[in-house]
Amino acid sequence: MLSLLTGCALFLSAPDVQVNDVAIVGIDSKAVEVELYFTITNPNSYPLKLLGYSYDLQVMALPLAKGGARESIEFKAGSATDVRLPVRVMFRSLYEILKRGPNPDKMPYTLNAGLEVDSPLGVHTFPVEKSGSFKVPEKYRPAFYLKQFRNIIGELVE
């Protein structure tokens, strides 16, 4: 029986996950909304169905967000699927990062995730580890808000 189970694993290839972009898409009084954009390629000759995922996102080697969801997405056989992962980051989580004086043009991140997929060979969880960097858009940088504040004060004084 054990030989049969390990043999099945040989016929199931892990999906290839590529991080395409990390973008700040919104900001409110409590948090920053971030989206991670992926392309997931299914190298198998049969479809895989995502049942759920978990993730742990770090920026500058500091914990930023953790979570997961039960979500159903089909990855067609031998093709690529674009996927978006929304993440809400509380300001208290950003505080330690800002204290380190990061370079907003090159913010290093590490994403550790697990993809739970269903296939004709059963349910499997595939680990995903990705690292890279992203650029913080100008409109979300502290210098942008300081400039806006100076402009408002300047108008009030004049």
Image (cartoon, rainbow, N blue to C red):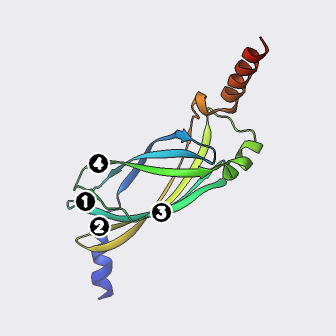
Q: Do callouts 2 and 4 mark residues in contact (Cβ within 8 Å)?
A: no
In terms of sequence position, does the residue under pointer 1 or pointer 2 come before the other? Answer: 2
- Give the quadrant of residue 7: bottom left
User: In percent of the image, x 65 and y 32: which residue is there?
Assistant: 141
Q: Do callouts 4 and 3 mark residues in contact (Cβ within 8 Å)?
A: no
Q: Nearer the viewer, mark 3 or mark 2?
A: 3
The amino acid beneath tag 1 is: Asn
In the picture, the disc for residue 68 is 3
> Residue 19, how many percent across, how many down?
45, 46
> CA–CA distance between discs 1 and 2?
7 Å
Q: In this view of the protein, can residue 38 be seen by the observer?
A: yes
Q: Nearer the viewer, mark 1 or mark 3?
A: 3
Q: Is residue 44 above or below residue 85?
A: below
User: How busy is the neighbourhood of tag 3: few (under 14 within 10 Å), some, or many (20 plus)?
Assistant: some
> Residue 68, how many percent across, how many down?
47, 63
In the picture, the disc for residue 118 is none
| Residue 77 as seen in the image, left or right of residue 153 | left
> Which residue carries the number 2 mark?
12
